[in-house]
Amino acid sequence: MKMRLLLTAATLVTVLLLAGCAAGANPALNTPDGADHIAGFWSGLWQGIISPITFIISLFSNNVNIYEVHNNGGWYDFGFLFGISIAFGGSARAACRR
């Protein structure tokens, strides 16, 4: 009984932490390319890591986008793909199966 309560509490805390990391509305969506903030590698990395959560939220909300509209190109893309590989485990899972 005590173990089940502990598992439920840990699950609740994990869900709340993940919900707190979800991306919000993109304020630069309808602004010209010369916006104040251009997303680079670190923004791409973070948005790639939280992409599974953001994807689920984007299914139910038109205000949330997975991909940053104003980015600096290659470095943002590299960070985004690297973040996705971190979120989904990359090749580490394949190596562990052997």
Image (spheres, rainbow, N blue to C red):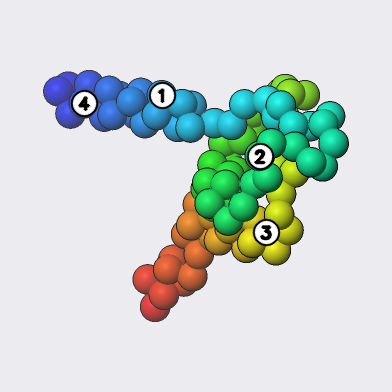
N-terminal label among 4 and 1: 4
Q: CA distance from mark 4 to mark 2?
A: 42 Å
Report the amino acid beneath label 3.
Asp
Give the left or right position of residue 12, taking residue 91 as reference: left
Residue matched to label 4: 6
Q: Amino acid at mark 1?
A: Leu
Residue 12: x, y in percent?
Answer: 35, 23
Q: Dot 2 corresponds to which residue?
A: 37
- Mark 3 and mark 2 lie on one chain; the one further toward the N terminus is 2
Nearer to us of marks 4 and 1 is: 1
Callouts 4 and 2 close, C-beta under 8 Å: no
* Inter-mark Cα distance, 4 to 1: 15 Å
**Quadrant of the image containing the C terminus:** bottom left
Mark 3 vs mark 4: give the one in front: 3
**Residue at 39% over, 29% down:** 17
Spatial distance from mark 3 to mark 4, Cα to Cα? 39 Å
- Residue located beneath label 3 in the image: 77
Q: Secondary structure at mark 2?
A: loop
Mark 1 near mark 2, Cβ–Cβ under 8 Å?
no
| 37 relative to 57, above or below | below
Q: Residue 47 or 70: which is nearer the viewer? A: 70
Q: Amino acid at mark 2?
A: His
| Residue at image point 70% right, 63% down | 74
Which one is earlier in the sequence, the residue at label 4 or at label 2?
4
Q: Which residue is mark 1?
A: 16
- Asked whether residue 48 appears in the rendered view, the answer is no
Q: Secondary structure at mark 1?
A: helix
